[in-house]
Image (cartoon, rainbow, N blue to C red):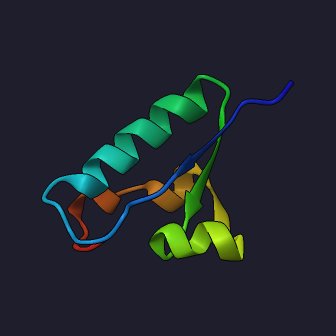
């Protein structure tokens, strides 16, 4: 059975959120999970607007603005 987790932010920016997303994603990927980012908040759930998060995608996002 595969282990999958989706990451969704519900709107509005919060300081440090990109760092949390990067750290959690790295840890989960190293633990064998498939991690997916759900784009456009809760609307992305209904539109199935997801993307697989890879170490290359999240590399350095802690230093970027926005989520």
Give the quarter of the image for residue 66.
bottom left
Front in this rendered view, residue 2 or 12: 12
**Residue at the image position 59 percent from the left and 22 percent from the top:** 31
Q: Residue 35 in the image: x percent, y percent?
A: 61, 45
Q: Residue furthest left?
A: 15
Front in this rendered view, residue 7 or 23: 7
**Residue at the image position 42 percent from the left and 55 percent from the top:** 59
Front in this rendered view, residue 56 or 65: 65
* Residue 49 in view of the camera: no
Position of the N terminus by quadrant:
top right
**Residue at the image position 29 percent from the left and 57 percent from the top:** 18
Give the quarter of the image for residue 3.
top right
When the figure is inspected, residue 29 is found, relative to residue 54, above or below; the finding is above
Q: How many marks?
A: 0
When the figure is inspected, residue 9 is found, relative to residue 34, above or below; the finding is below
Q: Is residue 16 left or right of residue 30?
A: left
Q: Residue 43 in the image: x percent, y percent?
A: 55, 75
Position of the C terminus by quadrant:
bottom left
Give the quarter of the image for residue 44.
bottom right
Q: Residue furthest right?
A: 1
* Residue 27 in view of the camera: yes
Q: Residue 49 in the image: x percent, y percent?
A: 66, 73
Q: Is residue 49 left or right of residue 37?
A: right
When the figure is inspected, residue 34 is found, relative to residue 40, above or below; the finding is above
């Amino acid at each position: 059975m595969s282990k999958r987790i989706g990451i969704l932010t519900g709107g509005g920016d919060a300081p440090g959120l990109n760092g949390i997303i990067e750290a959690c994603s790295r840890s989960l990927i190293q633990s064998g999970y498939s991690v997916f980012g759900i784009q456009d908040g809760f609307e992305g759930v209904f539109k199935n607007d997801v993307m697989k998060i890879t170490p290359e995608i999240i590399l350095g996002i802690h230093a970027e603005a926005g989520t």
